[in-house]
């Protein structure tokens, strides 16, 4: 809206107050998109989506009589993003995003445990309507719930823990992710500021920030400044190699 554009202009003026410098050259475009422009909101009708959820529910309950509750969600969005850089360059990106998630609660006697699994990406719904796609989601959610149901308390004290891929990556993100953002290091407010080329992790540790994986949820064709995303090595064999910017 015009009001939003006016507020954006006021924000830029406030940021520029008392500052001087030159505009950076615009980023070089790649003319490549990491995902299609299909709108998932125009995809299958409401009845088809309801049928999918009913099929998932029936499949999960038939797998194990201990299933007491099964819930699933199917969501989608479609965004048109237009970025106008200070030099007047305009970049446009169309971003679809869908996700299917399944949660299962199993129980025996007075004990209940839960498990969940899901996936999504920058695609339409068609892939997630196929049994070959969603049945493994139910299987994994049920497996987690049953493992939890049969689990016993772990011994107390310090333990060696081996983390797999996937969600354990959140621990890495919280530990160093924000500290490796370029702005914090430019302002020298990060613990990693000025440590390029220095060892900050054990040998064998390599961390890559990759925003270029086709159709993946975390990928973007361009970032919020209109810069094409990249495959950036942050830490290589324990040595700090770069920042996210």
Image (spheres, rainbow, N blue to C red):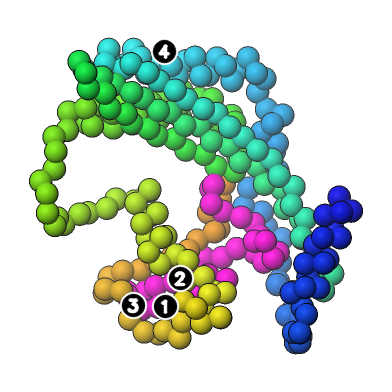
Of labels 3 and 2, earlier in sequence is 2
Q: Quadrant of residue 75?
A: top right
Q: Pick the residue in front: 167 or 203.
A: 167
Q: Tell me if residue 45 comes above or below residue 83 in the rendering.
A: above
Is the C-beta separation of discs 2 and 1 under 8 Å? yes
Q: Tell me if residue 85 comes above or below residue 80 in the rendering.
A: below
In the visual, does 57 lie left or right of 216?
left
Q: Which residue is mark 1?
A: 191
Region rendered in magenta? 216-245
Q: Which residue is mark 4?
A: 58
Is the C-beta separation of discs 2 and 4 under 8 Å? no
From this viewpoint, is residue 89 visible?
no
Which residue does the image show at 40% across and 54% down from the upper left?
A: 170
Which residue does the image show at 53% across and 75% down from the upper left?
A: 184
43 magenta-colored: no
226 magenta-colored: yes
């Amino acid at each position: 809206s015009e009001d939003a554009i006016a507020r954006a202009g006021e924000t830029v003026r406030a940021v520029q107050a008392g500052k001087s410098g030159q505009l950076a050259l615009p980023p070089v475009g790649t003319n490549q998109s990491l995902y299609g422009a299909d709108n998932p909101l125009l995809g299958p009708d409401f009845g088809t989506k309801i049928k999918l959820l009913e099929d998932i529910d029936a499949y999960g309950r038939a797998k194990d009589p201990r299933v007491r509750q099964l819930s699933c969600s199917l969501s989608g969005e479609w965004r048109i993003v237009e970025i106008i850089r200070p030099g007047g360059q305009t970049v446009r990106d169309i971003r679809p995003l869908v996700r299917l998630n399944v949660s299962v609660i199993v129980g025996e006697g007075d004990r209940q445990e839960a498990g969940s699994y899901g996936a999504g990406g920058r695609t339409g719904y068609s892939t997630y309507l196929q049994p070959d796609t969603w049945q493994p989601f139910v299987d994994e959610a049920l497996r987690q719930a049953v493992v939890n149901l049969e689990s016993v308390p772990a011994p107390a004290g310090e333990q060696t823990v081996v983390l797999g891929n996937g969600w354990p990556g959140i621990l890495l993100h919280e530990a160093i992710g924000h500290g490796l953002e370029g702005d914090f290091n430019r302002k020298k407010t990060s613990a990693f500021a000025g440590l390029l080329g220095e060892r900050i992790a054990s040998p064998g540790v390599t961390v890559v920030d990759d925003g270029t994986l086709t159709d993946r949820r975390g990928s973007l064709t361009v970032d919020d400044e209109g810069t094409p995303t990249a495959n950036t090595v942050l830490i290589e064999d324990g040595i700090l190699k770069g920042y996210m910017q």
